[in-house]
Structure formats: structure tokens, C-alpha cells
Amino acid sequence: MKFFVPLPRADRAPESLATNSSDSLGRGMDVALTLLVFLILGWLLDRWLGTAPLFMIVLTVVSSVGQFIRMKYVYDAHMQRLEAERLAARRRPAAPNRMEDAA
């Protein structure tokens, strides 16, 4: 059984798989690894200075707050870009229908 593979159309660029996907997995890994690094740094500082889990807790909270603020700014920038694209698409004149031109 043969599978039909459509050829790319000349009037548009081929889309890659990454174009329509989000990088939620990458962002999640970024958050998890950053938290882990700060947790380990806090643990090492606590061992070196002989304090209770003071630095471990403080650095983990600082990392969590920083990651949350970073995610908010990235989200806001993404939403502003999408809003600008939506407004630009609204202001563009409608393309003429090719079927009407042929008649």
C-alpha cells in the first residue's frame, strides 16, 4: 500500500514541525534544572558554613521567585507579539479571490 505524500506548494514555504509546537518541555526542564542547581548550591553553602538548611531554603525560594518572574515576562512578550500579529492581520486588505479573477 502506497502512502500519498503531497508535494510542497510553490505559493507557501514548507512548515517545519517546530513551527507549530510549543517549547513547554524545554521551559519545564529549564525551571527544574535551575531549581536543582540553586538547591545544590544552598546545600553546599550550608555544609561549608555549618548552618542549618538556611541557604538551601533561601536559594530555592529566590530561584522559584526568579523563575516565576521570568516566565511572566516571557509570557507577556509572547502575548504582545501575538496581539500585534492579530491586529496587523486585521488591518491588511483582503486578498482578491483567484476564482473571481479567472472568470
Image (cartoon, rainbow, N blue to C red):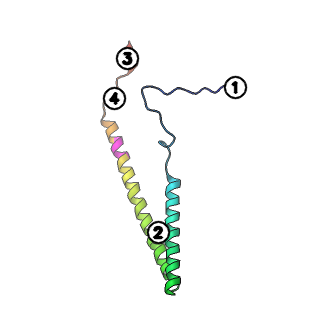
What residue is disc 3 on? 100
Residue 99 visible somewhere in the drawing: yes
Q: Which residues are magenta?
A: 82-86
Q: Relative to 28, is 21 above or below?
A: above
Point out residue 93 in the picture as x, y percentages from the top left corner. Answer: 30, 30
Q: Marks 4 and 3, how far apart in space? A: 14 Å
Q: Marks 4 and 2, how far apart in space? A: 46 Å
What residue is disc 2 on? 64
Q: Marks 3 and 1, how far apart in space? A: 39 Å
What residue is disc 4 on? 94
Mark 2: secondary structure: helix
Q: Quadrant of the N terminus?
A: top right
- Which amino acid type is marked by label 4? Ala
Mark 3: secondary structure: helix
**Which residue is pictured at 51% across the width and 55% down the height?**
26
Q: Tell which circle, 3 or 1, labels the residue nearer the N-terminal end.
A: 1
- Which amino acid type is marked by label 3? Glu
The mark lying in front, picked from 4 and 1, is 1
